[in-house]
Image: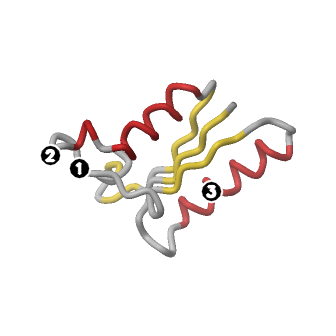
Amino acid sequence: EFLVISTSLNPNSRSHGLASAARQHILDEGRACDFIDLRETTLPFCDVDGCYSDPKVHDVKRRIQSAHGIIMAVPIYNYYASASGK
């Protein structure tokens, strides 16, 4: 199973469109594909109080660990990956 992660939080994101296209291509090839859209899956910031015990963090971790391949669609802001992509 593959996992595609769309990390942009922008509602008009072009990288989200690329993530959706990648997911569709994987599905068209007859392969299983999980999809995480960070616009719909709100995760806590890293190292804030309670972030490591958050059920959403555990769910995303499980999905990442079970994937055979991962594609991340990450927007670039000021020459570097967005904070949500990191």
C-beta proximity under 8 Å, tags 2 and 1 = yes
C-beta proximity under 8 Å, tags 3 and 2 = no
Look at the image and tell me in which quarter the N terminus lies. Answer: top right
The kind of residue on which mark 1 rests is Phe
Q: Which residue is mark 1?
A: 45
Of residues 61 and 19, the one drawn nearer to the viewer in this rendering: 61
Q: CA distance from mark 3 to mark 2?
A: 31 Å
Q: Nearer the viewer, mark 3 or mark 1?
A: 1
The disc, 3 or 1, on the residue closer to the chain's N-terminal end is 3
Q: Is residue 11 left or right of residue 76?
A: right
Of residues 9 and 79, the one drawn nearer to the viewer in this rendering: 9
Vertically, is 30 above or below 41?
A: above
Query: Is disc 3 placed on a helix, strand or loop?
Result: helix
Q: So how many labels did they put on this image?
A: 3
The kind of residue on which mark 3 rests is Leu
Q: Is residue 86 left or right of residue 16?
A: left
Look at the image and tell me in which quarter the C terminus lies. Answer: top left
Q: Which residue is mark 2?
A: 48
Q: CA distance from mark 3 to mark 1?
A: 25 Å
User: Which residue in the rendered view is the most extreme toward the left?
Assistant: 49
Answer with the quarter of the image where residue 57 lies. top left
Query: Is disc 1 placed on a helix, strand or loop?
Result: loop
Q: Is residue 51 left or right of residue 41?
A: left
Identity of the residue drawn at 45% across and 51% down: 74
Answer with the quarter of the image where residue 4 lies. top right
Q: Which residue is mark 3?
A: 18
Q: Position of residue 44 (x, y in %)?
A: 27, 51
Q: Position of residue 54 (x, y in %)?
A: 30, 44
Query: Is disc 2 placed on a helix, strand or loop?
Result: loop
Identity of the residue drawn at 64% across and 43% down: 34
Identity of the residue drawn at 44% across and 56% down: 41
